[in-house]
Amino acid sequence: MFFVPLLQASGATSSHSLLSVVPFVLIIAIFYFFIIRPQNKKQKETQKMIDALKKGDKVVTIGGIHGLVSQTKEKTVILKLDEGVKVEFNRSAIAGVVSDTPASSKSEKKAEESKETASDSEKAE
């Protein structure tokens, strides 16, 4: 029904009516590229991470509880929190998988790799 007045407009006013629609189209495009699309990408990555959970992974729940995956089921995961303490969580309650290497060592490794490639390129010259 919004487009009916646009279709009934004469040729002189039709360009004016179409120009008034352009800002709405731009706003929708901005929302899609800056809000909707990144949110969908993050949701897919989270789902992929949850599906890939396996025994022995160190995880953090959305409540901040750290544990080791002891057993996986279809919709739940049993986490070992301490010796003799096991708690069952929904898979959707897992916020992320914790890596064993600290972030500082990763940046140090990247710096070392870049130094090695720089020295290799100097040797080639």
Image (tube, grey):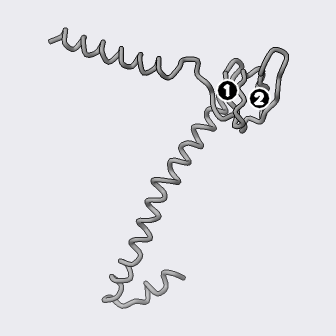
**Which residue appears at 36% of the width and 91% of the height?**
10
Between 17 and 114, the one lying in front of the other is 114
Residue with the mark numbered 1:
59
Along the horizontal axis of the image, is 41 left or right of 8?
A: right
Residue with the mark numbered 2:
77
Instruction: Give the vertical position of 14 relative to 87 (above or below).
Output: below
- For marks 1 and 2 on the same chain, the one whose residue lies earlier in the sequence: 1
Along the horizontal axis of the image, is 115 left or right of 85?
A: left
Dividing the picture into quadrants, the one containing residue 19 is: bottom left
Residue 58 image point, x, y percent: 67, 22
Amino acid type at image mark 2: Val
Amino acid type at image mark 1: Val
Residue 14 image point, x, y percent: 36, 85
Q: Could you say whether the residue bearing mark 1 is in a helix, strand or loop?
A: strand
Instruction: Give the vertical position of 4 relative to 62 (above or below).
Output: below
Distance in Å between CA atoms under marks 1 and 2: 11 Å
Quarter holding the C terminus? top left
**Which residue appears at 38% of the width and 82% of the height?**
17
Residue 35 image point, x, y percent: 51, 53
Dividing the picture into quadrants, the one containing residue 75 is: top right
**Which residue appears at 56% of the width and 42% of the height?**
42
Return the residue found at the far right.
84
Q: Across the whole image, how many numbered discs are drawn on residues?
A: 2
Instruction: Give the vertical position of 42 relative to 119 (above or below).
Output: below
Neighbor class of circle 1 (other Cα within 10 Å; few <14, some 14-19, many 20+) is: many
Q: Could you say whether the residue bearing mark 2 is in a helix, strand or loop?
A: strand
- For discs 1 and 2, the disc positioned in front in the rendered view: 1
- The image's mark for residue 13 is none
Between 125 and 60, the one lying in front of the other is 60
Contact check, label 1 and label 2, Cβ < 8 Å: yes
Neighbor class of circle 2 (other Cα within 10 Å; few <14, some 14-19, many 20+) is: many
Residue 39 image point, x, y percent: 55, 48
